[in-house]
């Protein structure tokens, strides 16, 4: 099975975001990318949309629900967020969505910075197999995976998807 | 088969690390790699960013139980560990052992086994005997993460790492720095842990400044330079750590008087002028103003003493999260094998 | 236990005498060696022992050991510790007066001797207290103690209250030609330390015992002994400087001898790195330079070897380093330690001198070389015997030794005391 072309999905995602913003005009949209792949995608979106606000990032290491089995991430980069997210509109960006657990952790962390009025979720690729009731508002494309296969975004330039089979790799 | 090796070939196993080389106890800064010390500083940096938010807690140690075991009173240190544990969402139990079980004649070992039976995940230990934390980690409760909050004169590794964090945040590097540690090095666990950490992180030079009565024998073997003259020792220094001088030192014939000590080894504005113009001044606290440090220096522009305190919370959060994580990994590896 | 008048024939015995190694057959009757190689007429052995592969020595003499009785029965008994000594090859053990109560009266000395005699494992000889209760103030009844079987007198680690008391004690002892066994230790300078004062104690933050805490006592007592004519024996010296001071005193004619403790030949302060309380001994382990100097002096036949055996219960060691009680249980692993020292370059001749011949001479014991008509005090070491040191094969109550639960090489297989088998592993 061929992997989708990341730049093409990005173009689609940018288009969808523009449409959404046209429907839901926002004064100060805050774009937040999840480390690491999500931040690359967020950076492109942030540029394309010419957002006046700075680009923000989120490191969910302290919020993961698998800390008990996997331990602490050895390389934590920390989150860069405004100190107050009260009443903000957040565009949360990740590269791929699968189980939904990363996004659950991300949303939890966002709430420790305040109470945003809206959070919209944009992902470059949706791999299905959800374990939590979380759906992206915007997505560049969908892909159905077999067995142990995983997909990971490589970047930052060029952006490119890569296979990761848990049985073979790592 | 040979009979047992003697003398030189002996090396103590590093009980602080799990099989993957990750921290599972934090007992001393000695014997840890520069990478691991840098990981601690990086993780602490990330926690600093969480400390400016309205909600300062992160959920990482939710459901874990941390026991503050203080065999020696220290409200300050205990409070920072307590706050760090709370900000990691752990449950915390403060046990003031100094006044409870040991007075009833219960042995340290029995006290700890009782606490272990309560399914604690971490002991933060302060004890007046050097090596107490090692003893607990290696022989009594090896499956519980032990954080050394000060053992005798031996080590105070979280204090040393918060000093390292303060240096890095102010100087941006360790390479090329000249660091002076001034005062009662003999009785200071902070000085010992700092020397080990500074050595590992690769500063250019470590100096100790004090009269001979306050310096351990053969200190040069630790890779430091000894100065009995403070004016000489402060020249070109980038970082100054002042150590607390306790009043008992006069009674045990280590020093003649406070006034003579201050005259020779007190950090005054004038003396500070001998160091680099951008030198920073640290003190592990509590300070004796007018004994080892002039008030105007303690409160001056070059003092980073209060920053040390806030960095202390982040460093303690970092080592607590890392040690619990390292214990989990060790347990997982054990159950798989 | 064998009948006292039994006859024992030892075949293929190997022993050291006057610098050479001998082989032959020994014939023992009663408490004596009655013949070597030439079988006496009508000798019918009750017991034949094949000693091939073993090294035979006159029974070891321990110049200094700690007995847990009276006073510390949690740490062992006279029975358990003398049995451990016999298993290690000792046929005579001299024990410290630092018990509770202190061994400062003939009644107490009799009681200890009686208890050891009843157990029958090895001869136990009390080193009597030189001052009452070891308080360093009033002299004990030294002459009476000597009459009741004390081979020497000591203050252990306890100081004399004043130098004048020390001088008087030395003079009084010299009057009766009594031997003073000194543990050279300035308690004041030792400053409640638990480790050798040096780079390592500095690094570990352990209270240091400076070298001068020993050497100052050595120098002081050498001069006082010289002035008073006291016969002086230092036990458990630990520093190179002490060796030099004693050698110099001997050269100018002072009547002084010395021993070092086994632990100081085996280990150095570097072992303290892991804070293992089993290495907590008093006086503390010193540097490699010191260890080398002690090894050289033993090798040269200038220094005797004592065990400073000290059995501790588990609770006394299950604490942080400084809070643990000092002492190492030496007997159970001692033959393996000797084998180890031979690997390190001290030969069996030198060990025989340090453990058998020199102490016998110094403490006035009957000389028991391997010769006709000598007392049959013998032990038999197998230097290649591999075994695992554990609770089951340990005789001492204390297992406070770093080699506990480890594989060892070298073991004593047989001990004869006055012609009686007191320890036997050969069949």
Image: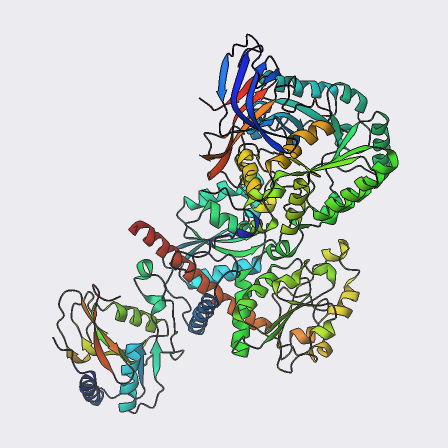
Tell me the quarter of the picture where residue A33 sits: bottom left
In percent of width and height, residue C175 lies at 86, 26
Residue C63, above or below B29: above
Q: Nearer the viewer, residue C88 or C188?
A: C88
Q: Is residue A47 left or right of residue B121?
A: left
Picture colour scheme: rainbow
Tell me the quarter of the picture where residue C17 sits: top right
Residue B285, above or below C125: below
Q: In this rendering, does residue C313 appear at all? A: no
Q: Nearer the viewer, residue B29 or A46?
A: B29
**Residue that protrudes farthest toward the front in the picture:** C38
In percent of width and height, residue A140 lies at 18, 82
Q: Is residue C254 left or right of residue B158?
A: right
In percent of width and height, residue B238 lies at 62, 77
In the rendered image, the quadrant that contains the N terminus of chain B is top left
In percent of width and height, residue B108 lies at 53, 43
Q: Is residue B211 left or right of residue B280?
A: right
Image point 70% across, 31% down: which residue? Answer: C358
**Residue that protrudes farthest toward the top in the picture:** C42
Image point 57% across, 62% down: which residue? Answer: B193
Image point 66% across, 45% down: which residue? Answer: C296
Tell me the quarter of the picture where residue C159 sits: top right
Q: Nearer the viewer, residue A150 or B303?
A: A150
Residue C170, above or below B74: above
Numbered label tally: 0
Q: In this rendering, does residue B85 appear at all? A: yes
């Amino acid at each position: 099975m061929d992997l989708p072309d990341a730049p093409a999905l990005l173009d689609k995602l940018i288009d969808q975001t523009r449409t959404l913003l046209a429907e839901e005009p926002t004064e100060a949209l805050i774009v937040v990318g999840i480390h690491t792949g999500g931040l690359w995608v967020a950076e492109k979106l942030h540029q394309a949309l010419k957002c006046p606000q700075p680009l923000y990032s989120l490191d969910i290491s302290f919020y993961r629900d698998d800390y008990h089995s996997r331990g602490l991430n050895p390389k934590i980069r920390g989150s860069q967020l405004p100190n107050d997210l009260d009443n903000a509109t957040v565009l949360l960006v990740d590269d791929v969505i699968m189980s939904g657990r990363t996004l659950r952790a991300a949303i939890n962390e966002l709430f420790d910075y305040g109470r945003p009025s809206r959070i919209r979720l944009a992902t470059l690729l949706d791999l299905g197999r959800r374990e939590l009731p979380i759906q992206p508002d915007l997505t560049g494309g969908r892909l159905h995976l077999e067995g142990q296969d995983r997909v990971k975004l490589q970047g930052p330039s060029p952006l490119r998807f890569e296979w990761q089979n848990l049985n073979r790799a790592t | 088969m040979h009979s047992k090796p003697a003398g030189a070939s002996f090396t103590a196993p590093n009980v602080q690390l799990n099989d993957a080389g990750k921290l599972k106890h934090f007992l001393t800064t000695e014997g840890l790699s520069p990478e691991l010390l840098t990981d601690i500083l990086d993780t602490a940096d990330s926690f600093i960013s969480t400390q400016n938010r309205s909600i300062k807690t992160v959920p990482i140690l939710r459901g874990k139980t941390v026991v503050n075991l203080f065999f020696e009173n220290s409200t300050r240190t205990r409070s920072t560990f307590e706050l760090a544990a709370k900000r990691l969402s752990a449950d915390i139990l403060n046990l003031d052992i100094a006044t409870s079980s040991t007075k009833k004649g219960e042995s340290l070992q029995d006290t700890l086994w009782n606490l272990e039976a309560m399914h604690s995940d971490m002991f933060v230990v302060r004890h007046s005997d050097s090596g107490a934390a090692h003893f607990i980690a290696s022989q009594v409760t090896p499956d519980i993460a032990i954080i050394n909050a000060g053992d005798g004169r031996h080590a105070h590794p979280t204090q040393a790492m918060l000093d390292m964090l303060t240096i890095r945040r102010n100087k941006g590097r360790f390479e090329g720095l000249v660091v002076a540690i001034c005062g009662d090095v003999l009785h200071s666990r902070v000085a010992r842990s700092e020397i080990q950490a500074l050595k590992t992180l690769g500063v250019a030079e470590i100096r100790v400044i004090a009269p001979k009565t306050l310096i351990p024998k053969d200190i040069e073997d630790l890779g430091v330079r000894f100065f009995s003259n403070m004016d000489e020792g402060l020249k070109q220094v980038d970082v100054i750590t002042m150590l607390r001088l306790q009043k008992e030192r006069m009674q045990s014939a280590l020093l003649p008087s406070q006034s003579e000590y201050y005259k020779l080894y007190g950090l005054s504005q004038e003396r500070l002028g001998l160091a680099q113009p951008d030198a920073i001044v640290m003190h592990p606290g509590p300070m004796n103003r007018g004994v080892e440090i002039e008030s105007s220096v303690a409160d001056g522009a070059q003092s980073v003493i209060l920053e040390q305190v806030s960095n202390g919370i982040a460093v303690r959060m970092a080592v607590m999260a890392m040690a619990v994580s390292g214990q989990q990994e060790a347990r997982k590896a054990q159950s798989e094998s | 236990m064998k009948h006292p008048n039994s006859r024992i024939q030892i075949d293929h015995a190997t022993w050291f005498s006057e610098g050479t190694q001998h082989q032959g057959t020994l014939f023992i009757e009663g408490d004596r060696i009655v013949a070597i190689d030439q079988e006496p007429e009508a000798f019918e052995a009750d017991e034949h022992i094949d000693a091939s592969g073993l090294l035979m020595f006159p029974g070891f003499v321990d110049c200094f050991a700690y007995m847990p009785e009276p006073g510390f029965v949690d740490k062992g008994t006279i029975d358990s510790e003398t049995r451990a000594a016999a298993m290690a090859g000792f046929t005579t053990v001299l024990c410290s007066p630092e018990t509770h109560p202190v061994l400062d009266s003939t009644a107490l000395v009799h009681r200890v001797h009686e208890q050891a005699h009843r157990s029958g494992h090895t001869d136990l000889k009390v080193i009597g207290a030189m001052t009452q209760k070891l308080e360093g103030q009033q002299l004990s009844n030294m002459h009476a103690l000597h009459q009741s079987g004390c081979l020497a007198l000591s203050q252990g680690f306890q100081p004399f209250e004043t130098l004048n008391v020390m001088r008087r004690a030395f003079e009084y002892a010299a009057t009766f030609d009594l031997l003073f066994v000194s543990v050279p230790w300035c308690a004041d300078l030792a400053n409640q330390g638990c480790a050798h004062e040096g780079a390592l104690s500095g690094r570990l933050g352990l209270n240091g015992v400076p070298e001068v805490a020993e050497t100052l006592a050595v120098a002081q007592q050498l001069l006082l002994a010289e002035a008073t004519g006291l016969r002086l024996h230092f036990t458990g010296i630990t520093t190179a400087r002490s060796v030099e001071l004693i050698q110099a005193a001997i050269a100018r004619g002072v009547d002084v001898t010395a021993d070092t403790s086994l632990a100081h030949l085996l280990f150095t302060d570097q072992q303290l790195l892991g804070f293992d309380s089993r290495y907590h001994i008093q006086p503390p382990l010193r540097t490699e330079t010191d260890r080398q100097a002690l090894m050289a002096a033993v090798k040269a036949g200038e220094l005797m070897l004592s065990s400073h055996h000290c059995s501790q219960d588990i609770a006394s060691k299950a604490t942080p380093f400084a809070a643990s009680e000092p002492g190492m249980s030496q007997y159970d692993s001692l033959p393996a330690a000797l084998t180890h020292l031979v690997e390190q370059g001290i030969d069996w001749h030198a060990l025989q001198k340090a453990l058998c011949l020199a102490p016998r001479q110094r403490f006035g014991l009957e000389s028991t070389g391997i010769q006709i008509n000598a007392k049959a005090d013998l032990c038999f070491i197998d230097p290649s015997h591999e075994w695992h040191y554990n609770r089951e094969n340990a005789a001492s109550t204390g297992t406070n030794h770093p080699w506990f639960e480890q594989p060892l090489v070298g073991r004593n297989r047989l001990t004869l005391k006055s012609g009686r088998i007191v320890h036997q592993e050969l069949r």
